Amino acid sequence: MNKHYTIMLIPQNSEKVKSIKIPGLFFKSAIAVVSVFILFCGILIFDYWKVLSQINENKHLSIENNQLREQVQVFQMKLNSLSDDLSRINTFEKKLRIITGLEDRTQATIPMIKEDNSTMMDDHSLETLPKQPKKDYKGAYLDNTNKKNDKEFIELKKLYSKKIAQNIGFKNNYSITKKWSEIIKNSFDLADKYANFDYSFNILKRKASQTESNINELDRHLLNKKSLLNSTPTILPTNGWITSYFGPRKSPHSGRIKMHEGLDVGAKYGTPIIAPADGFISFAGKKSGFGLFVRIDHGYGIQTLFAHSQKLHVKKGQIIKRGHLIAEVGNTGHSTGPHLHYEVRVNGVAVDPLYFVLK
């Protein structure tokens, strides 16, 4: 207990050496205090370094979170665009089904998409189809209004929340509290966005699969109807201008009102006349009043007639395809100038050729 330590101070000059006596207990206590202070400073420096590291990590996570949110938004925009494409394909597929008879026109509604995203009905549908409420077709198949009550969406959100919790380090019994940092809350907010993306993707995937199935059915139907389609006169047989339409008119010869059972297409002498559909030539030659005349039998009760030609390029009994050259525009028979008189007959009854013309 009487031990002490002497500290000697030796100056550079010839002055006397000074000595300081320090009790042993005080000296040891001072060493202990200094050691504790150094340890405390070391701990503070280490904690400060960890805080700096955490700040940098949080900054990185914050940037990463923002990037992920932006990427999710980009994906959502792409999904909306894909949804609109599928909506247009579906509309086109429905129209084809009606045209080909696979779907009853009176039972079908075909929404058309205009540039302003409002809807309209296809031609002539206002009289036969019930009125439909207007709908915004932006992301037409991604109506997620009731998704939060959908079992599939709830399961997806739980799955993503669990994955995020595991990545953060929470194994069980995790819940968002005010004690958590804003970054952790933002991370869990991403679970909703991820679930929404997967949910929307699954909707589009199912719709695409259904549309593919419908188009395959339509393809099979069209293959069965190929012969009928090829035999339907869907084009004007010559280039020119229509001078007289189908319907009642004043006859240029008798001056009386008479039914005009076809189209008159004015054109220059020698303008090619082509077959508007597949068939065979049932008549080719001169006919009273019609001059040089051609009649094509397309089957299915459909016939087309071509009159007033100056030259014929086909013979009776010849099988032809759509686009085949059959004659040249002329002015033979009862004609007031070079033109083609064109008729379409269904089961022997003259019908307006423009009903069949697609282009």
Image (cartoon, rainbow, N blue to C red):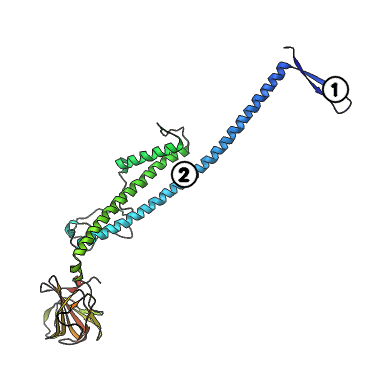
Any part of residue 184 in sight: yes
Residue position for label 2 = 65
Could you tell me the amino acid type at mark 1? Answer: Val
Q: Which residue is drawn at 22% across and 84% down?
A: 328
Q: Which of 8 and 107 is in front in this view?
A: 8
Disc marking residue 269 = none
Q: Which residue is drawn at 83% across and 25% down?
A: 10
Could you tell me the amino acid type at mark 2? Answer: Asn
Q: Residue reaching furthest right? A: 14
Any part of residue 110 in sight: no
| Quarter location, residue 167 | top left
C-alpha distance separating marks 1 and 2: 70 Å
Residue 44: image location, x then y, percent? 60, 31
Q: Earlier in the sequence, mark 1 or mark 2?
A: 1
Quadrant in which the C terminus is drawn: bottom left
Q: Which residue is drawn at 38% across and 53% down?
A: 78
Secondary structure state at the residue bearing disc 1:
loop
Q: Which residue is drawn at 29% across and 58% down?
A: 89
Camera-side mark, 1 or 2 = 1
| Quarter location, residue 213 | bottom left
> Left of 34 or right of it: where is 242?
left
Q: How many marks?
A: 2
Residue position for label 1 = 17
Q: Is residue 207 above or below residue 264?
A: above
Residue 111: image location, x then y, percent? 26, 57
Secondary structure state at the residue bearing disc 2:
helix
Residue 34: image location, x then y, percent? 68, 24
| Quarter location, residue 231 | bottom left
Residue 148: image location, x then y, percent? 32, 41
